[in-house]
Image (tube, rainbow, N blue to C red):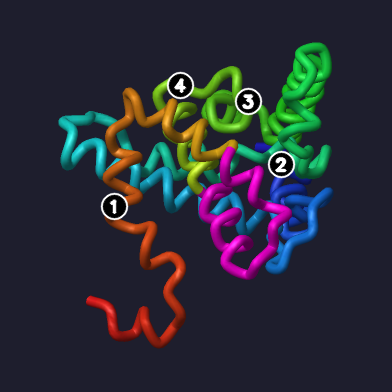
């Protein structure tokens, strides 16, 4: 079997270099690798809560894996501000086209034998809609927690972000009850200091 060197992993390993919230002042810096890990953990929790409390039948492991790769286009494009991306329908369509091209470019760096199984992870149009929605909800939760954390440090730059995300999460919660239970279970402790966490059970 002939083996050709692939740059796929090299692109993924550059995720820590990609700054999120680049157009905004942040008290705590965040990169795409950190964000992707957090979204994967949250997606895994959401899927587990759905299965355990709401008679769901999804794979938490699949949700986590989709989440790990959900920002793969940013390895080539960097993080694009949400309002910039979505305030104009024409711009949104063009951004989506560019993102899809970047996803396909990343997919095409893999050996031919791996492309089929990675296509439904890397190319967002090919992701199963159930997992795409879980990961999107996890993405919103991650951003909401980030905004709440920044506001706890009096960074008012994130006030409008939190308001927007609250509205979006309320809409998602209409047919995803696991979101409300997730917040009841986990939100409060996310803002505890290390001493408070050490005393928590």
Q: For this rendering, which residue is in front, 175 or 63?
A: 175
In primary-sequence order, the first of circles 3 and 1 is 3
Could you tell me how far apart the alpha carbons at marks 4 and 3 are, in whole angstroms? 11 Å
SS state under label 4: loop
Q: Kindly indicate whether the residue at mark 1 contacts the one at mark 3 (C-beta within 8 angstroms).
A: no
SS state under label 3: loop
In primary-sequence order, the first of circles 4 and 1 is 4
Could you tell me how far apart the alpha carbons at marks 2 and 1 are, in whole angstroms? 50 Å
For mark 3, what is the residue?
A: 123
> Residue 3: which disc?
2
Q: Quadrant of the N terminus?
A: top right
In primary-sequence order, the first of circles 2 and 1 is 2
In primary-sequence order, the first of circles 4 and 3 is 3
Question: Neighbour class for label 3 at 10 Å: few (<14), some, many (≥20)?
Answer: many
Question: Neighbour class for label 4 at 10 Å: few (<14), some, many (≥20)?
Answer: few
Could you tell me how far apart the alpha carbons at marks 4 and 1 are, in whole angstroms? 28 Å
Compared to residue 29, the image places residue 194 above or below, namely below
For mark 1, what is the residue?
A: 184
Location of residue 18 in the rendering, given as x and y in whole percent from the top left corner? 78, 53
Question: Neighbour class for label 1 at 10 Å: few (<14), some, many (≥20)?
Answer: few
Could you tell me if residue 6 is visible in this image?
A: no
Q: For this rendering, which residue is in front, 106 or 29?
A: 29
For mark 4, what is the residue?
A: 128
Could you tell me how far apart the alpha carbons at marks 3 and 1 are, in whole angstroms? 33 Å
Front disc: 4 or 2: 4
Could you tell me if residue 185 is visible in this image?
A: yes
Is residue 72 found inside the magenta-colored segment of the image? no
């Amino acid at each position: 079997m002939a083996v050709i060197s692939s740059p796929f992993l090299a692109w993924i390993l550059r995720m820590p270099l990609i700054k999120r919230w680049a157009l905004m002042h942040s008290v705590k810096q965040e990169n795409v690798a950190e964000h992707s890990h957090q979204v994967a953990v949250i997606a895994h929790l959401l899927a587990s809560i759905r299965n355990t409390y709401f008679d769901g039948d999804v794979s938490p492991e699949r949700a986590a894996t989709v989440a790990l790769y959900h920002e793969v286009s940013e390895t080539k494009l960097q993080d694009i501000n949400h309002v910039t991306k979505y305030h104009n329908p024409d711009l949104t369509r063009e951004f989506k086209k560019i993102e899809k091209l970047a996803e396909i470019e990343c997919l095409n760096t893999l050996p031919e034998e791996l492309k089929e199984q990675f296509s439904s992870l890397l190319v967002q149009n090919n992701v199963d809609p159930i997992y795409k929605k879980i990961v999107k909800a996890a993405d919103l939760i991650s951003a909401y927690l980030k905004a709440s954390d920044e506001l706890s440090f009096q960074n008012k730059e994130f006030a409008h972000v939190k308001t927007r995300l609250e509205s979006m999460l309320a809409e998602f919660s209409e047919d995803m009850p696991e979101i409300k239970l997730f917040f009841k279970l986990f939100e409060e402790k996310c803002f505890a200091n290390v001493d408070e966490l050490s005393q928590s059970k």
